[in-house]
Image: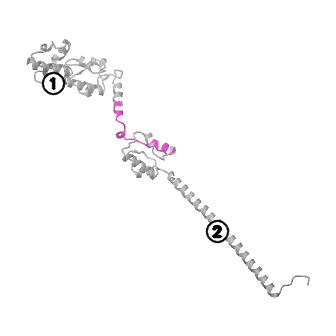
Amino acid sequence: MGGMYYHRSDRKLIVMVLVIIAILIGVFVYLGESNRMTATGAAADSLSVDSARESARGKATQEYYAVETSMPKLFYFDPNTADSTQLLSLGLQPWQVRNIYKYRAKGGVYRKPTDFARLYGLTVKQYKALEPYIRISSDYLPASILVKEEEEEVVRDTIKYPVKISDDEYVVLNRADTAQLKRVPGIGSWYARQIVRYGNRLGGYVDVGQLAEIEGFPEEALQYFAVEQPSVTRLNLNRLTLNEMSRHPYIGFYRAKAIIDYRRLYGKINSLDDLKLNKHFTPEAIEKLKPYVMF
């Protein structure tokens, strides 16, 4: 016979083997496709999770730095005293308000509007909108402005200002208060207070020229003062202590000590001539002191 001949049983076996091979191939193909789809799905899920995380992170960042979308209400406020309701109404974020409260709790003070610009997270746009409405109470301003105001007042106290009393009028020293003294050309609040203080230290004025002993006193103003029937407080040089005598402008510490030493060595002082041998009691010093002492 020219071709291969298989028995019926052989043919059945071959067919069965082929079927089994086909089944195995089908199983392998199915499993491979399933694994590929699973891997693709896992990658997709991973990308989806990462995307969700990025979205959440971006949203959180956006919310953290977000500016109030609703229109803020602008009104005058002091950042040192404004409460949370007012600050939130101005368009500030809750976390910004908390930072303000923490700053104030630590003793921080906003002394000028630009100090508020240092608030963490405050944008230039926000500050420009709020700056015209910031009002710092005078209680929170630096104390140095008081010195500046006094210096400016001294500058204003010049003879250049309009005459307050006429040239033929005058103010009587020892009787005038600060209000009357300020009527004199060139005399403002600062010099008026100095005139009263120095007069109290002296025990009263006996001569208009004593005003020139006040530092910086305007000489042009001397013509508007007068001393009538001077009544002064006299110091008993035999009874007063060192500290009591030292407070008088014409005695001071060294002359007071010389008086104490004289009393200790020689006893009672009868006149200022008893002290003229002491180097601290010059003729000029004795002459100035005469109206203010007694024995």
- For label 2, count other residues whose C-alpha is less than 10 Å away and answer few (under 14), some (14-19) or many (20+): few
Q: Is residue 8 above or below residue 231?
A: below
Expressed as whole percent of the image width and height from the top left, the position of residue 36 reads 67, 68
Determine if the magenta segment contains residue 141: yes
For the question of whether residue 203 can be seen, the reply is no
184 sits left or right of 295 in the view:
right
Q: Which residues are magenta?
A: 125-147
User: Which class describes the residues within 10 Å of circle 1: few (<14), some (14-19), or many (20+)?
Assistant: some
Q: How is the image coloured?
A: one colour
Chief secondary structure of the magenta portion: helix
**Residue 165 coordinates in the image, percent (x, y):** 29, 22
Give the label, 2 or 1, closer to the camera.
2
Dot 2 or dot 1: first in sequence order is: 2
> Is 8 situated left or right of 80 in this image?
right
Residue placed under numbered mark 2 in the picture: 38
Tell me which residue sits at (12%, 18%) in the image: 262
Q: Tell me which residue sits at (30%, 27%) in the image.
A: 190
| Residue ID at (52%, 55%) | 60
Mark 1, residue position: 242
Q: Callout 2, which amino acid?
A: Thr
Can residue 34 be seen?
yes
Image quadrant where residue 173 sits: top left
- Residue 30 is situated, as x and y percent measured from the top left of the image, at 70, 73
- The residues tagged by marks 2 and 1 sit, at their Cα atoms, a distance apart of 106 Å
Residue 211 located within the stretch drawn in magenta:
no
Classify mark 2: helix, strand or loop: helix
> Which secondary structure, mark 1?
helix
